[in-house]
Amino acid sequence: MRVAHAALLLLVLAAGCARGQRDVQVPEPANVAAQSGTPQPLPAATPAPSAQPTAPRPARETAPPIAKKPATAPALDLNSLEAQLRETKAIGVFTKITLKNQVDDLLDKFREYYQGKAKFTMADLRRAYDLLMMKVLSLLQDEDQKLASAIVSSREAIWSLLADPIKFATFQG
Amino acid sequence: MNTVTVALARLLLVAAVFAMPSFAADDEEALKKDLTAVIALHGQPCGEVVAVKVLAQDDYAATCKDKNKYHVYLNAEGRVIVEKQK
């Protein structure tokens, strides 16, 4: 009888151990899922000149359409994002190193561009930046939605750092 | 009391033996997933890594579901290199 009890307990324990970390909760996808298609400007982004909604409005047409609610970019905390990226378990070590390699390559391209040595345009750099962001987000969105959302929110703020030669030089330190 | 302690100790020992391969399997799955992502980030066809052989520290031979094989390693400059094998 005691042996049977022990065996049962053992099976329960073994089953518990075998489960490991497979029970990853995947919350309701936020706006990250929308990123998997074509890159779109984010709400926090600096609005493009043609970004005003053109859909008909029911009332108050006389009110001035702009400057009602100035778009404020979220505070960009690069150090926090970097720390979270380092610590996230959603991306493996080799993948993190590969991503860092690709970030370094992109920063080199910006440097080259600002030194006037580049054959590519700022639009090419934006495309490369968007692609890299998509890679990061696709790696994160299933297992670390919080960080993926933080990155989505900071996406335009990071781009504004890169796309401005003065800010870029300051950022490079 | 003594027999209970001995039984418990045996139980823990056997549980540990059962648990260790499970952790190792989890590690291997994580490594396969990591290498799958690395190969994809390098734009190489793979689908999914199904087998990994550790050649050295930070040096792996990966076999993909689509039968492609890659040598994935970290070079001296800190870059992850993916080389297709024949």
Image (cartoon, coloured by chain):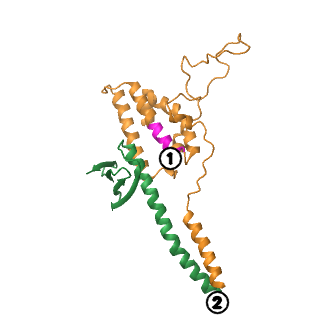
Main SS of the magenta segment?
A: helix
**Which amino acid is tagged 2?**
Asn
Specify the quadrant of the image occupied by residue B9. Answer: bottom right
- For the residues beneath circles 2 and 1, the answer to whether they share a chain is no
Q: Nearer the viewer, residue A33 or A126?
A: A33
Chain letter tied to green: B
Q: Quadrant of the C terminus of chain A?
A: top left
Is residue A140 shown in magenta?
Answer: yes
Whether residue A98 is visible: yes
- Residue A69 position (above or below residue A141): above
Q: Which percent across, then down, holds residue B23?
A: 50, 65
* Residue on which the image places disc 1: A85
Find residue B2 and name its label: 2
Indicate left or right for A157 with A65 as reference: left
2 or 1: mark nearer the eye: 2
Which residue is more in the foreground, A8 or A67?
A8
Front residue of this view, candidates B1 and A79 = B1
* Element under disc 1: helix
Q: Is residue A169 magenta?
A: no
Q: Amino acid at mark 1?
A: Leu
Q: Tell me the orange chain.
A: A
> Relative to residue B44, is residue A127 depicted above or below?
above
Q: Mark 2 belongs to which subunit? A: B
Query: Residue B53, percent across and down?
Result: 35, 61
For the point 34% across and 26% down, the residue is A120
C-beta proximity under 8 Å, tags 2 and 1: no
Q: How many marks?
A: 2
- At 35% across and 61% down in the image, what residue appears? B54
* Residue A167, x across and y down, in percent: 46, 30
Segment colored magenta: A132-141
Mark 2, secondary structure of its residue? helix
